[in-house]
Amino acid sequence: MPSGRLSVVVTRRLPEPVETRMKELFDVTLRDDDTPMSRDELAKAMAEADILVPTLTDTIDANLLARAGERLKLIANFGAGFDHIDVASALQRGILVSNTPGVSADDTADMTMALMMSVTRRIPEGLQQIKDGGFSGFSPTALLGTRVSGKRLGILGMGRVGQAVARRARAFGMQIHYHNRRRLREETEAAFEATYWESLDQMVARMDVISVNCPHTPSTFHLMNARRLKLMKDGAVIINTSRGEVIDEPALTRLLKSGDISGAGLDVFEHEGEANSELRNLNNVVLLPHMASATLEGRLEMGEKVIINIKTFADGHRPPDQVVPSML
């Protein structure tokens, strides 16, 4: 490692307390505005810095990593997801990658429930009616939604976020079902009174609500494809606060338009920043701008994890949140 303070480049604006603390600890270059770096700007940063602090808006592939300088030894990602980084290529070049897991599980689970209630109880439609001046008084048949109590919730991905969703959904009186790469331990399963489905197809066909909470990996790309989406029962809804690539978005759009899927709540999209116009025009869809983890408390905790990963690495130790090949 070079002597003196580490050279750290941050690619996006971070909460002020995080930036201030980084200034105190490192020779840090901060972003003046909150626009994503261009590819050339990323390449320049990677050529000159000891450590890069990117976010999910920064696509760091093998070609970009080939332009990295010999000084770059750690990519300390600000965020839990790392599908935007070619971790295998980075490791081949001796560049470690770390992330910030476990920080936003509760925040994301809160938003999952908010989307679920928004879709099933038609909250945006009611809000729009008020804004448009169309509310003339109570009507027994207006904006009828459905209860979530007693309904079957199928959780796709029972990691930290999935389990946080399960805890909240149980408080709403929902029945918990899940599909996961590995079955939970018996005592964990019992705590949620959860039913495990080895077959995702069989689970999808029987649920009232599907919640997507798995990461985006090569094996989960379009895991909810057209065939699987068509298996959803009449009246079912789907919620996604994970990654847009897990759902075949064009297929979902078609099924929502036809009414084969009753509704959807989406915080993420297959092409980030490009919520398609067809989805935006559907009344049975609630769309949010990737804000499930957007709490001040969560962002500050993410920043603290980034700083700890960098400091631990600078001290000659393995970053506590290093991404390892078994996680890919």
Image: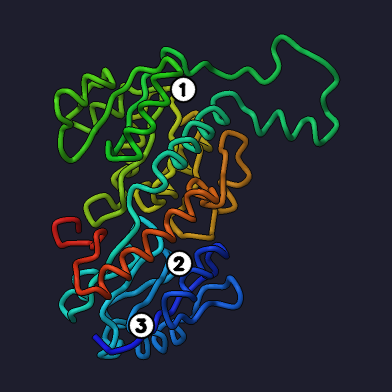
Q: Nearer the viewer, mark 2 or mark 1?
A: 2
Q: Nearer the viewer, residue 113 or 283?
A: 113
- What x and y, as percent, mark residue 208? 40, 22
**Image quarter of residue 106:** top left
- What x and y, as percent, mark residue 189? 21, 24
User: In the drawing, what numbered circle is on residue 235?
Assistant: 1
Q: Nearer the viewer, residue 314 or 281?
A: 314
Residue bearing mark 2: 57
Q: Under tag 3, what secondary structure?
A: loop
Q: Nearer the viewer, mark 3 or mark 2?
A: 3
Residue bearing mark 3: 6
Identity of the amino acid at label 2? Thr
**Sequence-first disc among 3 and 1:** 3
Q: Under tag 2, what secondary structure?
A: loop
Identity of the amino acid at label 1? Gly
Mark 1 nearby-residue class (10 Å; few <14, some 14–19, many ≥20): some
